[in-house]
Image: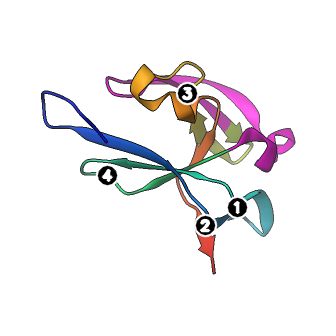
Amino acid sequence: MTTRPTGHSITVEQGTEHVRVVRDGQVLAESRRPLLLREAGLPVRYYLPPEDVRTDLLTPSETHTYCPFKGTASYWSLPDAPDLVWYYPDPKPDVAEIKDHLCFYDVETVG
């Protein structure tokens, strides 16, 4: 766990959950090797390896946001869902494991 002077903590761990992302009946991602990012005050986020995501269905977005704890995020979109997924091409050292892994707002864990 990484705790900052502000008391903000982030952990990244290898998960074994079966994670699936489906939108309008189409599977956008499916992985059994997500990285679980736990950040104080936020829900657990599943960062998926790019090989497990249908990037052929996504279009790079011009959107970029900055997190003081993770770095600058870039986004991907679907035609009807702008900025649906984000990733950190150059994350802060404390969360280096999430580099280039993709994170969706809504995921389903499969039993």
Q: Is residue 67 magenta?
A: yes
Q: Which element type, helix, strand or loop, lies under badge 3?
A: loop
Separation (CA) of disc 2 from disc 4: 19 Å
Residue 88 percent across, percent down from the top left: 55, 27
Q: Is residue 9 left or right of residue 56?
A: left
Q: In the figure, is residue 58 to the left or right of 69?
A: right
Q: Is residue 73 magenta?
A: yes
Q: CA distance from mark 1 to mark 2?
A: 6 Å
Of the numbered discs 1 and 2, the one sitting upstream in the chain is: 2
How crowded pointer 3 is (Cα within 10 Å; few <14, some 14-19, many 20+) is rated as: many
Look at mark 4 in the image and give the residue it sits on: 42
Marks 1 and 2 close (CB-CB < 8 Å)? yes
Q: Nearer the viewer, mark 1 or mark 4?
A: 1
Quadrant that contains the C terminus: bottom right
Amino acid type, label 4: Leu
**In the image, what residue type sits under mark 1?**
Arg
Specify the label residue 88 is tagged with. Answer: 3
Dot 1 or dot 4, earlier in sequence: 1
Q: How far separated are the C-alphas under marks 2 and 3?
A: 22 Å
Q: Residue placed farthest to the bottom in the image?
A: 111
Instruction: Name which residue lies at 41% across and 56% down.
Output: 44
Q: In what element is the residue under mark 4?
A: loop
Residue type pointed to by label 2: Glu
From this view, report whether residue 62 is shown above or below residue 28.
Answer: above
Q: Secondary structure at mark 1?
A: loop
Image: magenta residue range: 49-76
For marks 1 and 3, give the CA distance. 20 Å
Residue annotated with mark 2: 17
Q: Number of marks in the image?
A: 4
